[in-house]
Image: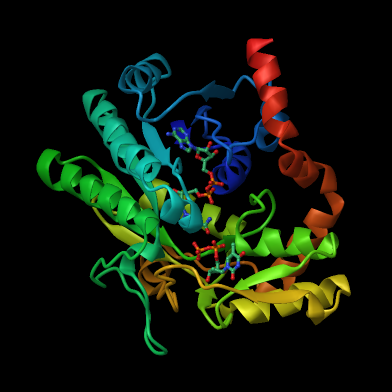
Amino acid sequence: MRMLVTGGAGFIGSNFIRYMMGREDIAHIVNLDKLTYAGNPDNVREWEGNPRYTFIRGDIAERKLVSHLMKAYKIDTVVNFAAESHVDRSIARPEVFVETNVLGTQSLLDAARAHGVAKFVQVSTDEVYGSLGREGYFTETTPLAPNSPYSASKAGSDLLVRAYHETYGMNVNITRCSNNYGPYQFPEKLIPLMITKALANEPLPVYGDGLNVRDWLHVEDHAAAVELVVRSGRPGEVYNIGGHNEQTNLEIVRLILAELGKPESLIRHVADRLGHDRRYAIDPAKITAELGWTPRYTFAVGIRETIRWYLANETWWRRIESGEYQAAEEDRIYG
Ligand code: NAD
Ligand code: TYD
């Protein structure tokens, strides 16, 4: 397999590449990443010089570049992780979400079609389904009802991917995963933000009443599911990915504080997020029945491992906090 992975310097993309580099039938992985604030060369440093791996700094919306890469590297499989991914940023500044998530995906689809790519996997999110009440789960047939500019841009890209299958017969899949956690997650998202703030004895900002529910999945379990979809997903199908692990934000924050031996007095209830979705929960029955996927991690084990990873890799997140990780890359490229 000769794979183009986009957004591979980010959280899930870099974990996916780590997962796939161990597979013998992966002849080459090209990682195309713009290195926005969320893209971190430290996440993919370990493969520098590996003949099966190439890093290209660039934008998925740059049509000529994307087309050139698919041709030059004889790409047969595209896995699109590249995205603007943070809801709060999308509320503050929606434009770039449309540029990358919608137009960027379309640019990839056009190039993949032009070069006869055999499989296109769009990595999406359960947030396209909107918000649940106390009961029920998102299934693949739940109507799309995105509430944030982020989730609306992801839903837009999903619809384009679907249309390229219906119209041009492209072999596509869309995966919709619940909230991920694990190593290398940028410390703007709930879990790494709370770990790093607690370690610094800083207040932990909990939006609203803290009773919003997210369905947490370890990033390695997500990577395993995406691999199955890449290899065996039925053309045109959507697969929801989630491990039935619902927690309120307050439960998560309290667990992190307890693990780190920090007091709950660090918790600060702050103004709620605009349009804050109340509950997400995935029904993974389809991917389990069709592709045999089940999560390997329990949350109890996964969250402890993740906390230990942040404790052991303080240099990694300190370089992010100081902005040093990007300055170093600029120096390397521009001298
Ligand atoms: P992330 O923000 O950590 O990483 C995104 C990566 O994409 C970064 O490396 C960034 O530099 C790159 N990128 C952004 N714009 C680009 C562009 N125009 N061209 C090329 N590269 C660009 O995000 P993540 O958490 O790893 O999420 C990866 C994907 O998974 C996203 O599509 C997201 O919507 C989806 N997803 C995330 C979660 C989650 O919990 N984090 C859950 C479900 C789905
Ligand atoms: P986040 O990690 O941003 O993921 P998403 O919004 O895509 O689900 O947020 C997870 C939950 O945590 C969400 O309900 C918002 C909440 N949250 C806080 O309470 N405080 C924070 O500082 C952040 C970043 C999130």
Residue 169: x, y in percent?
A: 15, 41
Name which residue lies at 82% across and 60% down: 308
Which quarter of the rendering shows the C terminus? top right
Quarter of the view holding residue 334: top right
Any part of residue 1 in sight: no
* Total count of labels: 0
Query: Where 18 falls versus 112 (above or below)?
Result: below
Between residue 302 and residue 51, name the one nearer to us.
302
Residue found at the very far right of the displayed protein: 261
Which quarter of the rendering shows the N terminus? top left
Between residue 14 and residue 223, name the one nearer to us.
14
Residue 59: x, y in percent?
A: 43, 27
User: Quarter containing ligand 2?
Assistant: bottom right
Residue 255: x, y in percent?
A: 74, 77
The answer to whether 309 appears left or right of 99 in the picture is right
Between residue 293 and residue 161, name the one nearer to us.
161
Residue found at the very far bottom of the displayed protein: 135
Residue found at the very far left of the displayed protein: 167
Name which residue lies at 77% across and 58% down: 196
Name which residue lies at 32% across and 43% down: 98
Between residue 104 and residue 116, name the one nearer to us.
104
Query: By what rule are the colours in the image chosen?
Result: rainbow
The answer to whether 171 appears left or right of 151 in the picture is left
Residue found at the very far front of the displayed protein: 271
Residue 326: x, y in percent?
A: 67, 30
Any part of residue 24 in sight: yes
The answer to whether 3 appears left or right of 247 in the picture is left
